[in-house]
Amino acid sequence: MLHLLISKHLFKGFVTLTLALWGLHATANMLANKHPAPWQEAEKLVRQGAFDWDPRILHGTLGNGMSYVFFDSRQDTETSEATSLQIQLIVEAGATDENTDQLGVAHMVEHMSFRSTQRYPNGARAALEALGLTQGRSFNAMTNADATRYMFTLPDSKVDTAQSTLSILKEMMFAPLISATDWRTEQPIILEEWRGGLSARKNINDQKKAIIRVGSAYPERPVIGTQDSITHTPVSRIKDFHRDWYAPNNMTLVMVGAMDRAQAQSLIETTFSDVPFKALPLRKPKDPELKDVLHIDTLTDPESRLNRIAYLFRFPKIPRDNLVSRRDQLIAYLGKKLLSQQIRRQSDANPDFISLNAVKGEASPNVDLVAFGTLYNPGNMAKQLENMLTEVERVRRYGFYQDDFDKALLDARQTAIRNIEAAKSRGVFWLAKLNTAATNNTPLPDPKLHNELAIALLETIDLEDVNQMVRDWLSMPDRVAYLQKAGDNQHPETLNTKLVINTLKQVQDKQLTAPVAFAAIPSRTLHAQINHQPAEPLSRESTGVSQWQLANGEQLWLVETPSAGNRIRFEAVQDIGFNNTLFDRAYTQVLIQMMSNQPPKGWTPDEYDQWKKDFGVSGSWDQSEHQRTFAVTIDQQKLAAQLATYQQLQAISGISEDVYTGYMDTLRRMDNSQVVRVSEQFRETFAEYKYGQSFTLKNELDGILGAKRQTLSQQAKALNKRPATYFVAAKNVERLLPVFNKYLGVIQKDQHLSNIAGPTLKPLMEHNEFTLNIAREPRATYRLEAFTPLQWNPNYTVMIPHLADKMNAKFKQVLRGEKQGVYSIHSDLRYDMSQQGVVASVKFTSAPERIEELNQTARDLLTTWYQELDQQWVTEQRGFFMTAQGRRDELIDTRLYRLKLSLEKFGDTRYLEQAEHLEKGFTLDNLTTLMNSLTWPSLTVGIMLPSN
């Protein structure tokens, strides 16, 4: 009987496979007849290897089943000089491979792999550190639902270093001791990792993933486990999981570095080939079982501020590795683009919508989804559901327009052409590409053949192909609908099956008009004004810097930068910071953002966006405490259009209705929310203790929301009258003077305006500590910030970033390693230019009962962590600094930044010369002087504990 059942099962599978192959063959024949030339070209490209491994990649499988891929980084122009070696081992075992009594065990194995092994009883971590590697920076690991990845970055690709690292990795994978003693040590670390990951956002995201993947193992297998499983899992279960899944035939080794293929292959074979093959357990199904059913759920969290409805369709993923399926993938790519575009267009045309959107994504390895979502105002959920389902039905019924399809097809071709060129040098992306291929168990093909294949197959696709696929998506019987309710939404409306089904019936019975068609954006001509008066020279330095006064009185600094090539760096600086004497901080920031998003007078935002796209205009505004800066790096041929656009932005006559309404609607939604997040309460209280005053955005919103558009327009015009100082870095930079003078010299400015800089906010020179019992999660949150006033000194600021790394490492060593009460910790040391002093900060989470002990440890460390620094450390760090300095000198904006700093600190250009010899100030004497100066007269400690 058992034999009969197996035979029936095999026969059913054989019939299914035969029918599928027959269907592929029939489709291929039809396409070959309908599109003979492109189909023949596609078949030729497949014969040439369009589905095979890129010949530059070494790939193979050892006799024990272990897969490997390697790329010699010297084959790529971007990485040809790099010496590092990247090693990553992917174990195809994650949370979804756990049994019901093994929650979080895959992640536990990852942690235990760095503990004791047969050859390294003191721990693999210690062995790696003995090689000079640092946890976090040089080696790390991560576990997800499907796999566990071990990652190593070696400073060089020497065979000895690689051999030692691979030997340790082999021990970690195949000979960990996984002892009860080590598990007792690691348990609290994992518990802190679980504790540190708790948040309102994670709560909502977990609920969202659970409903999107309903019917699969994913929602039932939290990667990190639960507090109970971390606390009570016996070491035997960890050993069981390792024994079951840590086999060479369940692993892929990925390497990228400056090493010969033969050396790499020899290293891999010598290290791993003697590990025996091991039969794996039957793998559990990971995908949800697709059914003719509507899944409904409601997501909520007290700290969530969003009210959203979503409607999803789930369906099988397109298979890989044949021409028909590759063509289907391209159809899906076009469908995804057109669907998102059409839904966005419908949303823009309907003022009732708040951010309606459509996305295509993945529910599991073999199941895809299309999701629609929109925000709604409480009390309006049912109407917004109807609006959303109406737009879904409109697309299903009418499909897309030919003009939109033609443009999407052209864009896809152009993308493929660009990809061919871009992939000639993938640089650091080689590792990510190889990892993706290894994870998906598919080859990484030659990019030229792969994209040429796409170009050929695109010739076989028409609008009806895309419309039919999207209709199929939107007719799938397995659907999900969920309601996300904000924490302050007390309205009784609920999402249920009856409401969705009835709404769907109403929508399907509607007489719907065709979707909104694309309206061509008219081409605009930017009428720039031209200045005919010459600029006047003010100074010329031997450092390659010259200063000029433009016809409108503004100053222009030109910085000779030989490494710039054909690129030009342009910056404009105005004294309009968020800390000023005219408006409060929030008001200024919103006003400046409105100004930055304002199109030229008489233009629509779409027309302005089209102009920027057509002429390659970019750049962005940034606002700091006392400045507003426009910055862009651009090629010379785009310079005139860029300057003409900047000129128009400086001459705005007001804030447009569209910009004003968009910002005000967003601010009103923020103001109407009654949700108070505990993290914001903690942050606001910390600022009050640190500065002696609080900063509550909600209180500042009233002034903004009360502002009329006309008032904001007048204020914007006044702010734009404030003069700017311009900086330009380029090769042979003075040749560009006429162009800059031509466009910038005509901008009308008022050179007699008084300074509006507000006083710099500085910390109180006292020690303060507070505790808030408001946290929802069972954890303590710790934050320390200390400040020492210290006059800016190039020698000090050169050393501080290196000290920051050392400080962070020491705090991790003590608080995470020795105390074992902290998992995620961040500490930093930096010089604050505006406050004119050094800031130290420490942040971590822990068990509430440990926080007082850890607080005292952190405060003690603040004044002792640097005591082990000596001449050897100074010499080593000076070498690192000189290497980094050499790289910085090649950047186009380095000399420009140094000039601005010199003008700010000295009022002249002297720092440009000093910057060439900064390493001379990296001495033990200067280090000692600096550290003795850091007495931290200002110290604020905040602790947030659970509310119960």
Image (spheres, rainbow, N blue to C red):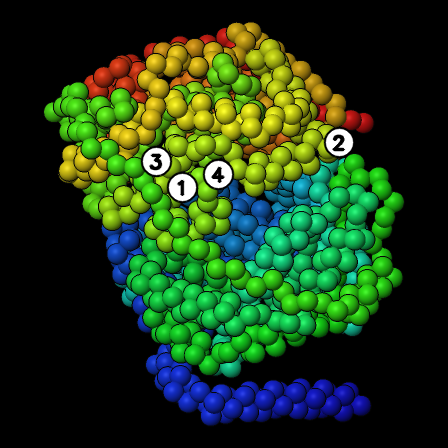
Q: Nearer the viewer, mark 2 or mark 3?
A: 3
For the point 77% across and 68% down, the residue is 510
In this view of the protein, which residue sits in the foreground, 244 or 942?
A: 942
In this view of the protein, which residue sits in the foreground, 505 or 110?
A: 505
Could you tell which of marks 2 and 3 lies nearer the N-terminus?
3
- Mark 2 to mark 3: distance in Å? 42 Å
- Mark 1 to mark 4: distance in Å? 46 Å
Q: State yes or no: discs 2 and 4 in contact (Cβ < 8 Å).
A: no
Q: Position of residue 874 (x, y in %)?
A: 30, 24
> What residue would you read off at disc 1?
133
Estimate how packed mark 4 is, as few (under 14), some (14 to 19) or many (20 or more) residues with alpha carbons within 10 Å.
Answer: some
> What residue would you read off at disc 4?
597
Estimate how packed mark 1 is, as few (under 14), some (14 to 19) or many (20 or more) residues with alpha carbons within 10 Å.
Answer: some
Tell me the amino acid under the disc marked 1. Answer: Leu
* Residue 369 seen in the figure: no
> What residue would you read off at disc 3?
647
Tell me the amino acid under the disc marked 2. Answer: Gln
Residue 507, by quadrant, is bottom right
> What residue would you read off at disc 2?
674
In the rendered view of the protein, which quadrant contains the C terminus?
top right
Tell me the amino acid under the disc marked 4. Answer: Asn
For the point 39% across and 32% down, the residue is 651
Residue 506, by quadrant, is bottom right
